[in-house]
Image (spheres, helix red, strand yellow):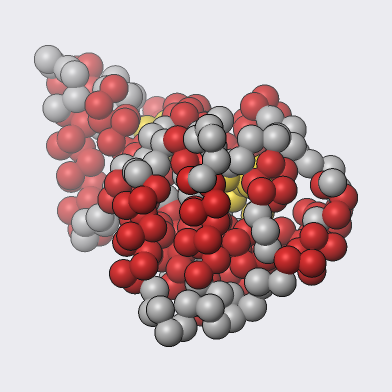
Amino acid sequence: MSNSFFFSPRRWYTPLLSFSIALGIGASTPEVTLAIPWLDILRQGVQVYQLYNVSNREEVQLGQRINQQLVGEQFQLYNNARVNSYVDRIGQRLAKNSTRPDIPYTFQVVKDDSINAFATAGGYVYVTTGLLKAADNEAQLAGVLAHEIGHIAERHLIEQMRETAIARGLATAAGIDDSTAVQLGVELALRRPNSREDEFEADARGVQTLGKAGYAQVATIDFLEKLRSQRSTPTFLSTHPATSDRIARLREIIDSQQANRGEGLNESNYQAQTQPLN
């Protein structure tokens, strides 16, 4: 399980752009790309996503479907109300202070010893029990969650789904159907390598959100440095740009005079909240 620590053209020409791209995807004749007529789609009630212009409602619905596949088939959620409530409380605090607070967010703990976290579409964020154990304090955990919220705020998964669908010839003139979109979202959520640009962008959004929520921004750097010092590379870092590059960027972004100001650095309080994991 890999982690994710995610252009919108004007509305009036979005359908035309989507249609034009679909016509050029792996087809030699118009008949192939027009294999799913609009009227047939409407009659069948099939959800179709135009990945150039996904509404908030559509993205949340897509995230729900992806979540059903992940929870039902790929991993097991950690069943402890105290820990789950704690993580959700931190996540919701961050979400309200993010650049995209207008969608519902769902924060879930995955029962897995690996140090990992990732986000999908529509506000769904996942963090492993292994990462919760690895964090020293609440601000470090909040830094991870804020990074994942940054991916969601920038719609990185939707962008990667669009690029992958085009590359594989999965799109039609209408867009991409619901079932294909869900399967592609599951695949990318679990196995996608994240681009340098996406990661740096999520880092920048994350520390901005962290500060607005009242947490000490230095915690993000502290956690990355702690993971970098481990003998084996945690899953959390394996698909990301070089950790040293990320730390250097974060030091440029964060005001050194303000870095240690904020909440969440008390280790004993964090250990008390996550005690069921021990």
Residue 167 drawn at (x, y percent): 25, 26
Q: At 50% from the left edge and 70% from the top edge, which residue is drawn?
A: 218
Determine whether, in the image, residue 234 is placed left or right of residue 154. right
- Image position of 256 with respect to 19: above or below: below
The quadrant of the picture occupied by the N terminus is top right
Locate residue 242: give its quadrant: top left
Residue 83 drawn at (x, y percent): 80, 55
Determine whether, in the image, residue 246 is placed left or right of residue 45. left
Residue 266 drawn at (x, y percent): 71, 72
Determine whether, in the image, residue 191 is placed left or right of residue 81. left
Residue 101 appears in the figure: no
- Image position of 24 with respect to 257: above or below: above
Residue 192 appears in the figure: yes
- Image position of 262 with respect to 92: above or below: below
Residue 36 drawn at (x, y percent): 33, 24
Q: From the viewer's side, name the closer residue of 233 and 110.
A: 233
Q: At 19% from the left edge and 25% from the top edge, which residue is drawn?
A: 25
Q: At 74% from the left edge and 33% from the top edge, which residue is drawn?
A: 76
Q: What is the count of numbered marks?
A: 0
Q: From the viewer's side, name the closer residue of 37 and 55.
A: 55
Locate residue 7: give its quadrant: bottom left
